[in-house]
Image: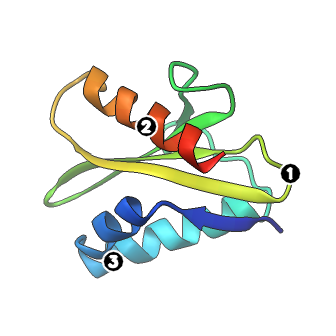
Amino acid sequence: MQTIRIHKSVAKGIKKLNPELGIQIAEILDLLARGESIGMPLSRPMPDIAGGSHELRLKDRSGQYRIFYYTKMSDMLMVFHFFKKKSQATPKKEIDIAQKRLRSML
């Protein structure tokens, strides 16, 4: 099982969500850390950020959320970006922030 490392801004964002969604996120991250592969519609690769990057696609009554995670490390699952989705495409600003955060965590 991999260790899960979560960027502090992601942890803050998750804490603000309704508890049910927070529990769902924790369960999904646990599955990923155990080596489970999760595909569409819940997760998809994000090669624009970096090879090995993926996004979790979550929603509840208050909106749609994205959580970016990195799987290329053998001993660690890195969760490096979280945001509320407001448009069809992922905004360039969010991709830029995600790339910087991932680089800082590697």
Mark 3 to mark 2: distance in Å? 25 Å
- Residue drawn at x 86%, y 51% as measured from the top left: 74
Residue 67 placement (x, y as % from top left) = 43, 49
- C-beta proximity under 8 Å, tags 3 and 2: no
Number of residues whose C-alpha sits closer than 10 Å to that of mark 3, classed few (under 14), some (14–19) or many (20 or more): few
**With 69 as the anchor, is 82 left or right in this view?**
left
Secondary structure at numbered mark 2:
helix
Amino acid type, residue under disc 1 in the picture: Ser
Residue situated in front as seen by the camera: 42 or 103: 103
- Residue drawn at x 71%, y 44% as measured from the top left: 71
Mark 1 to mark 3: distance in Å? 30 Å
Kindly identify which residue carries mark 3: 20
**In which quadrant is the N terminus drawn?**
bottom right
Residue 66 placement (x, y as % from top left) = 36, 45
**In which quadrant is the C terminus drawn?**
top right
Secondary structure at numbered mark 1:
loop
Kindly identify which residue carries mark 1: 74
